[in-house]
Image (cartoon, rainbow, N blue to C red):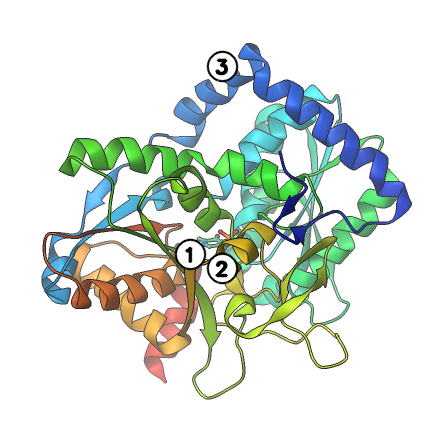
Amino acid sequence: MPRRFGPYGGAFVPETLVPALSELEREWRAARRDPTFRAELRRLSRTLAGRPTPLYFARRLTERARGAQIWLKREDLVHGGAHKFNNALGQGLLAKRMGKPRLIAETGAGQHGVATAMIGAALGLETEVYMGEVDMERQRPNVLRMELLGAKVRPVTSGQRTLKDAINAALRDWISSVRTTHYLLGSAVGPHPFPSIVAEFQSVIGREIAVQSRAAFGRLPDLAVACVGGGSNAIGTFHPLRRTEVEFLGVEAGGARLRGAGAASLSHGRPGILHGAYSYVLQDREGQISETESISAGLDYAGVGPEHAWLKDSGRARYIAVHDDDALRAFHWLARDEGILPALEPAHALFAAVAEARRRPPHQRIVVTLSGRGDKDLEVVGRAARR
Ligand SMILES: *Cc1c(COP(=O)(O)O)cnc(C)c1O
């Protein structure tokens, strides 16, 4: 498992966290070779998470685009309504194996907090989730969900009061609680070994895409599209396919049109250190982390996982930014064409996929990772429609 992806990655953390990260890496290496651990992960993936998720041909969305076929990898059907549970399940089992009775997590949209609360309950682990006050306000149903699942939600009142600040708070907690606590980081970000661990637990997405596209149309897709916040659903899609001919398109949040960089760290940021890793970061000239802005809380993050930074620099993947209003358009397309309410995060990817499909011939196949369902966003979408 690499500590670096090209020049990116690493572990820039306070001294006190070094032993915890080493312990985590050690346990992880042992667990992935342990048939009992793997069997338990497989069993719960099937019986609790609901895997495998289907690969769905979006016939009417394809007719709208009048080009390449669009297929959806249905991570919105995973327990809890998003891909987040793939990672929470894996890390929850790791925490249990390490004998840690307490989980902490950060959450932006609330999806990762919900996933952590679910696995905490299922495995009998005490769970606390840090969440920025601004996010608590805009994703209220998920706050209630976490509380009903038995987790404590800790409001974060510092900084911009969103995801970045919640990660800071969780890291601060972990520094003083490493002996009893596993920090269940929710995306492919942070210090080594987190980006690699999260990528591996999410890689079930890309592995299933490979098997299911061969079964459905006899080969791998021409293009895989996924939205990028911290980058976990995208890396789970791309990583297992990296040694194939499949093209990759990562889609970041462009925020409101004509207003700054949104949250598009790969498209508009430059290399720097955030949350213990060297990667692309949205920052000002002095290196202060920029304020980010997006209609989707789950993409509203100034950094991005280091593996994506390297996929970008090496040319293996392309990254673009899609604005709020285009994501909203794609939300309504999927609702009306296919009867599926997508989360606003993958709605960014859907918009990009339809644009790509328009430019490609009908024999091409595009797979879009539908990372989550839209229930949590109904209020935001409704408010936008009334404007
Ligand atoms: C959290 C979230 C994202 C963004 O996180 P990644 O780590 O980039 O995948 C995307 N979609 C949904 C539905 C989410 O909940």
Q: Secondary structure at mark 1?
A: strand
**Residue 148, located in which quarter of the rendered image?**
top right
Residue found 62% across the figure and 70% down from its top: 270
Measured from the top left, where is residue 82 in percent x and y? 43, 46
Type of amino acid at the residue the image marks with label 2? Lys
Local packing at callout 1 (Cα closer than 10 Å; few below 14, some 14-19, many 20+) is: some
Measured from the top left, where is residue 130 in percent x and y? 70, 52
Q: Could you tell which of marks 3 and 2 lies nearer the N-terminus?
A: 3
Alpha carbons under labels 2 and 1: distance apart: 5 Å
Residue found 76% across the figure and 57% down from its top: 168
Q: Nearer the viewer, residue 309 or 58?
A: 309
Type of amino acid at the residue the image marks with label 3? Ala
**Residue 65, located in which quarter of the rendered image?**
bottom left
Question: What residue is shown with label 1?
Answer: 317
Q: As drawn, is 381 to the left or to the right of 340?
A: right
Asked if the residues shown at circle 2 and circle 1 are in contact, with their CB atoms under 8 angstroms apart, the answer is yes
Q: Secondary structure at mark 3?
A: helix
Question: What residue is shown with label 3?
Answer: 39
Q: Secondary structure at mark 2?
A: helix
Q: Is mark 3 within 8 Å of ligand 1?
A: no
Question: What residue is shown with label 2?
Answer: 312
